[in-house]
Amino acid sequence: MSSSNSPTSQTSNSYVEQTVSVLSSVASYMRLPALASTGLAAVLTSLLYFKQKSVSQHHHHHRLRLPFLATTNLLFLCLTRIIIKPSPANPACIRALIYPSNIPANSRSDVPKPSDFGISNFEELYIPTDDGEKLSAFYIRGPRGHKNSNITILMFHGNAGNIGHRLPIARMIINYIGCNVFMLEYRGYGSSTGQPDESGLNVDAQTGLNYLRQRAETRDHKLMVYGQSLGGAVAIKLVSKNQEAGDIAGLILENTFLSIRKLIPSVVPPAKYLTLLCHQVWPSESVLPNITKVPTLFISGLQDEIVPPKHMKQLYDLSAAPTKRWKPLPGGDHNSSVLEEGYFEAMSDFIAEHGRLFRNQASVMKNATRIMEDLRVHFEGDQMEGAGQDSAENHSPQTKVAEGKGIDVKMTDAEVDEARYMSQAE
């Protein structure tokens, strides 16, 4: 898809075709060989929701079909070691199963760049964490002068691959929606250092948010936090801890789960007896209700063969967000929901609704703060000038404001419109 052929001017059919053309390249990076499996290895594979991502496109439905990925006897032996002979090596084995950062092969070393997808306005970054890791990231700018150019999406991907594999999604966001995109790589993935685990990924997410808050170009931006699958759990935890600051305008969740432990019996019921072995919990069902100040969009592929769609619906029901939106995609499975018509429209509408609200709110609050500060300075100065004079000669603060001595409390027409908009929104 060329930049001159923007999706905003396409018909619905053309939009779907262009989306498939761009995003199908994701699948080429996510294709995995079929591997043999036996006994508990198959259970473990189901438990950890790994899937083979070999691709076949259907002409009429424009979606990817991702058959089941089995695992090797090596994983079977690993599981046996975990159950029968606990040792300090087991946490690393468990991490490798839950966080398959080298699937597809060479994902730790082969990270596609934005330029590979025709994206030119970007920065490749390395950001240090407080615990000594170094995280790779892409900051991709949207079109200059676009109405959404002061909105940045902080994007968290699923449990396999790397940020480069999701660049076609970022390209759709900048071309179709006009936002900036910040793609942060987890520790132990792609070019980032370290080993992934639940606590570490939470540190990484906070590091990424702190970076955007401190960066000169983005510190005044409104932020949308966007997570897919495992990234949804990362996003939920991050927003729950940072909602009070007021700079997070929205949370976008796609095909994420209630918790890892709840996911296990949903995929393979007999494996429910193994859930206590999994210490990477990601308890989104208990964290999400704490988010009460950030609007949330739930995008659910109803054909999801990894995370049962009921997980997303239950999360939606549990949400206490001030505004929540439910977007079902009847033909979307776990990895191809992004290809379904309506996916980016739902995201665009959500950002338009809540990005605008927050921009107006910020503008009105800025003007209100300026006016109150002017009044305070003027009133305190007048009190000093009037000290020792007859109280009858002193004006009240209300009179001072009415006379407007030395201060300008007028709002521009645009600011009045913004204030009117905010009062109506409330």
Image (tube, helix red, strand yellow):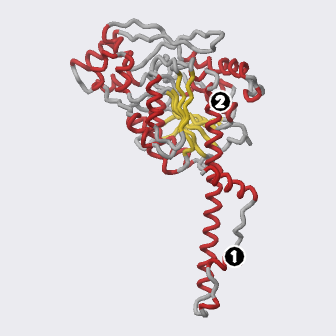
Q: Are marks 2 and 1 in contact (CB under 8 Å)?
A: no
The answer to whether 375 is drawn above or below residue 391 in the figure is above
In this rendered view, identify the residue nearer to me: 15 or 419: 419
- C-alpha gap between disc 2 and disc 1: 49 Å
Q: Amino acid at mark 2?
A: Glu
Q: Using residue 277 as the reference point, say whether residue 336 is left or right of it.
A: right
In this rendered view, identify the residue nearer to me: 211 or 390: 390
Q: Amino acid at mark 1?
A: Ala
In this rendered view, identify the residue nearer to me: 208 or 260: 260
Identify residue for label 1: 402
Mark 2 vs 1, N-terminal side: 2
Residue 372 % position (x, y): 61, 68
Residue 374 falls in which quadrant of the image?
Answer: bottom right
Is residue 195 something one can see in this rendering?
no
Identify residue for label 2: 345
Classify mark 1: helix, strand or loop. helix
Q: Nearer the viewer, mark 2 or mark 1?
A: 1
